[in-house]
Image (tube, helix red, strand yellow):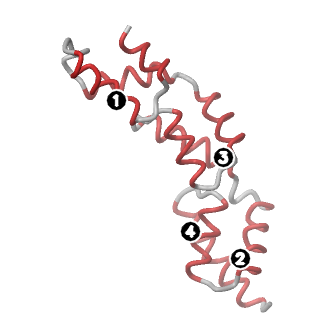
Amino acid sequence: MTEEAFSTIYNKSLDLISRREHSEKEVRDKLIKKFNEPDLIKLVTEKLIQNNLINDERYAEMYVTIRKRKGFGPKRIAYELSSKGINDSISSITINEEGGWTEAAENVFNKKFKNGIAIEFKDKAKQKSFLQNRGFSFQQIDSVFS
């Protein structure tokens, strides 16, 4: 292990995280694409965590807030967080703390369907399917239609 190689990888990681929050997995994956030094990358990510420069809890909070604002539900956000390497317990706690998912489902529904709830069964099914694809639970969807 050379000090120079460590510094190069560390500086690249700082460059990545200076633009936006990243999960540990995202940083590791991006560094692995650029450098063929898995041991050094592990040391770099450990140092970043130690210095609180990458923090999966903080990342999850930011991610949930942004995705909710864009009209996505808790199921979809949990899946996305999982694919970004966030522990299921962290994502479920963060999503539960965020709250307001029924209201979020209503907001995204009203934005998409200006004319309100459809009368025809087929059209109503399409509306429900839209909310389901956005990641809202059946309970949250039913609250929009009741």
Q: Which residue lies at the image location 38% right of the left edge and 15% below the top edge?
A: 144
In whole angstroms, how far apart are the C-alphas of marks 2 and 1?
42 Å
The residue carrying mark 3 is 58
The residue carrying mark 2 is 41
60 sits to left or right of 19: right
In whole angstroms, how far apart are the C-alphas of marks 1 and 4?
37 Å
User: Helix or strand or loop: what does disc 1 sit on?
Assistant: helix
User: Helix or strand or loop: what does disc 3 sit on?
Assistant: helix
- Across and down, in percent, residue 5 comes to 71, 88
Q: Nearer the viewer, residue 128 or 98?
A: 128
- The numbered mark, 4 or 2, whose residue comes first in the sequence reads 4
Point out the image quarter for the C terminus: top left
133 sits to left or right of 10: left
Q: Is residue 118 above or below residue 20?
A: above
Q: Which residue lies at the image location 36% right of the left edge and 12% below the top edge?
A: 145
Point out the image quarter for the N terminus: bottom right
* Mark in the foreground, 2 or 1: 1
Quarter-wise, where is residue 121 in the image? top left
User: Helix or strand or loop: what does disc 2 sit on?
Assistant: helix
The residue carrying mark 4 is 16
* Mark in the foreground, 4 or 2: 2
- The numbered mark, 2 or 1, whose residue comes first in the sequence reads 2
Q: Is residue 45 above or below residue 69?
A: below
Cβ atoms under marks 4 and 2 closer than 8 Å: no
127 sits to left or right of 71: left
Residue type at mark 2 is Ile
| Disc sitting over residue 129 in the figure | 1
Q: Which residue appears farthest toward the front when viewing the image?
A: 122
